[in-house]
Image (tube, rainbow, N blue to C red):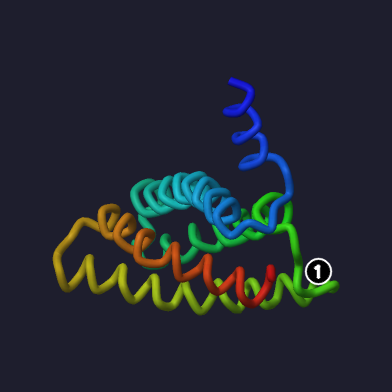
Amino acid sequence: MQAINSFFNKCLFVPSDSGLVQFLRYGLASVLVFLIDFSLLFMITEFLGVYYLISAALAFLVGMFLKHFFCVKWIFKRRRFQSAKKELLIFMFIGFGTLSVSELVLWLVTDWAGVYYLYSKVVVTFVMVGFKFTLRKRYLFS
């Protein structure tokens, strides 16, 4: 039992340079951020009547700032830049770049393939998660 507690403690609480631990933490943070992003997408689209691509972009922005918080405070031990402003700007640059790709895939899957926009969002999330992890680890937290 102590070995299991030690394993979970290392994976969840101890700062780590391990790519596997970072990827596991990134995955857990991604699930939480996805639930918030997905909920916002639904609420903004269905309750406020906003076009789904605009709702997706707004929800994505909220998620991007949450993900930055998780990356800085929990996922990655090392930071490439001393300046928090510079780091946030690069994080946002990566975020806006991946937002463009996400919006394109969301539109293709929804409008061209005829898939319900919320199902399309799940597809987009799976397509983008590994790509975003790689970019953020390489350019910001290594």
Image quadrant in which the N terminus is located: top right
Residue 95 against residue 22 in the figure, above or below: below
Foreground residue, 16 or 40? 16
Residue 55 against residue 44 in the figure, above or below: below
- Near mark 1 (Cα within 10 A), the count class, few <14, some 14-19 or many ≥20, is few
Image quadrant in which the C terminus is located: bottom right
Picture coordinates of residue 122 (x, y %)? 32, 55
Q: Residue farthest to the front?
A: 3
Picture coordinates of residue 59 (x, y %)? 49, 57
- Under tag 1, what secondary structure? helix
Q: Is residue 124 left or right of residue 4?
A: left
- Residue at 61% x, 75% y is 138
- Residue at 35% x, 66% y is 127
Give the labeled residue for mark 1: 84
- Residue at 73% x, 49% y is 15
- Residue at 41% x, 53% y is 41
Quadrant in the picture for residue 109: bottom left
Foreground residue, 59 or 63? 63
Residue 15 against residue 10 in the figure, above or below: below
Residue 12 against residue 75 in the figure, above or below: above
Picture coordinates of residue 62 (x, y %)? 57, 57
Foreground residue, 90 or 49? 90
Q: Residue farthest to the right?
A: 82
Quadrant in the picture for residue 103: bottom left
- Mark 1 belongs to which amino acid? Ala
Picture coordinates of residue 116 (x, y %)? 21, 56
Q: Is residue 30 left or right of residue 112?
A: right
The number of numbered badges drawn on the structure is 1
Q: Is residue 2 left or right of residue 87?
A: left
